[in-house]
Amino acid sequence: RQMLAGVAVTSVVVLVIDEVLEYVVLRQALLARFDSELSTKAQALVKASEIDDGEFEVDLNFAQFAGFGAEIARDFFEIRLPDGNIIERSPSLPAEALSDADARAWGSSGFANITLPNGAAGRAFWRSFQPAEEDNPEERLLELNLRAWEKYRDLQVVVASDLTDLHQTLRIAATTIAGVGAGVLLLALGIIHVLLGRGLRPLEQIAAEVRQIGARALDRRIRMDDIPVELQGMGEKLNELLARLEESFARERRFTSDAAHELRTPL
């Protein structure tokens, strides 16, 4: 029981550590994939941005295709001027900004967990960019476009997505890992219990044979046929001890018989 309890405690500790590590690795992998998708969407928005007739605009067809205009709002974006004013936002984003914090304080790029306008937990990625210049040299020299490029030369795009699906996936993964781990632990403890019983059976056999040896059965010996190698030394020493006891009892009986004979003769 002590061995089984020790093995059980050790197994539980090792299993818990293993499951925590598995969950952490899985969480980091899913989060890295989520961040990669945010970065890809931000890069696509940058590619879809342009200056046309002195005004900045984003191809809304792309916005619809990327899911920013879906009926169920899960993805959002906004593009800001250096002073923080929003000049373009996704159709899924209401008048409320993605974050009350000044985007300039975030740095040139990075990721952050935020609360979305719909109240759900979300994750945002932001980066600074400059709209692509007009390929036509004549258009590039127009005063209108020159002023526009000066105005929009240091923009920031912020892309955010709902974390609800990711959190649900992590909860399912955690439940699955815990359930499978508990099942494996119970199965392993059952197998260990059987193996320990078989491993300790030779000790029980030796103990049973020793209990049957008394003062009138000192000629009996422990059988060495089925004893494991680890217990053969103990079995041999017990047999040697029994042999010495048998010889000692035999000498005592001979001495008692001789003493009785000598006492009877004078009488």
Image (spheres, helix red, strand yellow):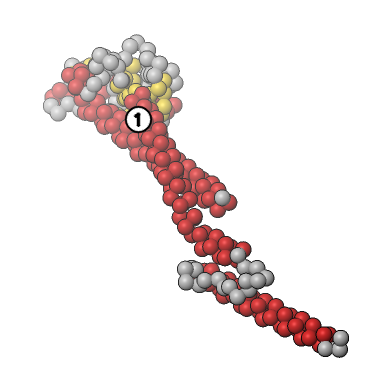
Up the image or down, 4 lies above or below 134; here it is: below
Q: Residue at 13% across / 24% down in the picture?
A: 138
Q: Which residue is more in the foreground, 240 or 14?
A: 240
Q: In this view, does 18 lie above or below 96?
A: below
Residue 2 position, x and y percent, is 58, 51
The percent coordinates of residue 266 (x first, y second) are 86, 89
Residue 255, quarter of the rendered image: bottom right
Q: In this view, does 141 lie to the left or right of 164?
A: left
In this rendering, position of residue 176 left or right of residue 51: right
Residue 45 visible somewhere in the drawing: yes
Q: Which amino acid does label 1 sit on?
A: Thr
**What residue is at 86 percent from the left and 86 percent from the top?**
267
* Residue 27 appears in view: no
User: Which residue occupies 51% across, 47% down?
Assistant: 8
Residue designated by label 1: 169
User: Which quadrant of the structure image shows residue 36?
Assistant: top left
From the top left corner, tell me how far across and down residue 224 is, in percent.
50, 72
Q: Which residue lies furthest to the right in this view?
A: 267
Q: Is residue 92 above or below residue 136?
A: above
Q: Nearer the viewer, residue 207 or 180?
A: 207
**Left or right of residue 87, residue 179 in this image:** right
